[in-house]
Amino acid sequence: MNNDSRIVFWGVGTSRTLRPIWVAEELGLSYELKPIGPRTGETQTKEYSKLNPKLKVPFCEDGDLKLSESLAICRYLISAYGANSALMRPQSSEDFAKEDEWLCYLYGELDETSLYVMRRHQGLPDVYGEAPVAVDAARTYAMRHIGVIEDYLKGRSYLLFESFGLADIFLVTCLNWAESYGIALPDNLTRYRDRIIQRQQYKTAIRKNQKSWS
């Protein structure tokens, strides 16, 4: 562990809060975890709203640096601390572009456009209202893109360069999320996900991310 780290993570309990915790575990970083949850009132406190006016989790502090958004936090951690880790780091402009392509695709098409719509109107209808048409459309859209990813992964162990990297972390968290909403994963994606979640770093991160805040 990096005992000189000043990293603080705010937020547990969601697929998005899992990502920076998992990355930190893969990098062998020490960090403090503030296990606040969304929609518990804890993001509305004076202390937290001063840190992050967006009132969302996850949020990261590293010394004077303050970052929100799971992708930005993970990118920063790998750039700042990942030189000697086994986590894949792109080595060229072309490699960075390919990783960005996949991260934008996963975040834009699975996380935000489909799974988060389902979370709002299927998982939290008392907050956001029931919208069965929107939920069905989001489910169909998610399944379409899961099919695209399934085809791409045939014959591959990982999304990029046959090395485990950030794109795989984002994909696995989205697959977990999709399955929790009753979306059946194709066999190849199930095997891919089941292999990756055997990583000890994942197991540690998922345990920490599930820490109760109630």
Image (cartoon, rainbow, N blue to C red):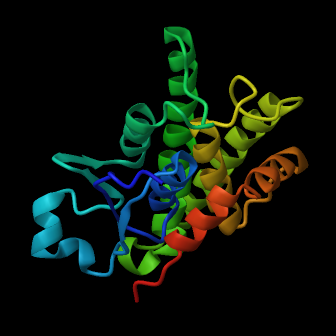
Residue 165 rendering spot, x and y as whole percentages: 62, 36
Residue 42, relative to residue 144: is it above or below? below
Name the image quarter holding residue 86. top right
What residue is at 49 percent from the left and 39 percent from the top? 108
Residue 213 rendering spot, x and y as whole percentages: 40, 84
Name the image quarter holding residue 122. bottom right
Name the image quarter holding residue 178. bottom right
Is residue 50 rendered to the left or right of residue 11? Answer: left
What residue is at 49 percent from the left and 10 percent from the top? 93
Single out the residue that lies furthest toward the front: 3
Query: Is there any visible trace of residue 68 in the rendered image?
Result: yes
Is residue 179 rendered to the left or right of residue 210? Answer: right
Is residue 98 rendered to the left or right of residue 21? Answer: right
Q: Nearer the viewer, residue 135 or 89?
A: 89
Residue 73 rendering spot, x and y as whole percentages: 37, 45
What residue is at 51 percent from the left and 19 percent from the top? 96
Residue 21, relative to residue 145: is it above or below? below
What residue is at 68 percent from the left and 39 percent from the top? 145
Q: Quadrant of the C terminus?
A: bottom left
Q: Nearer the viewer, residue 47 or 77?
A: 77
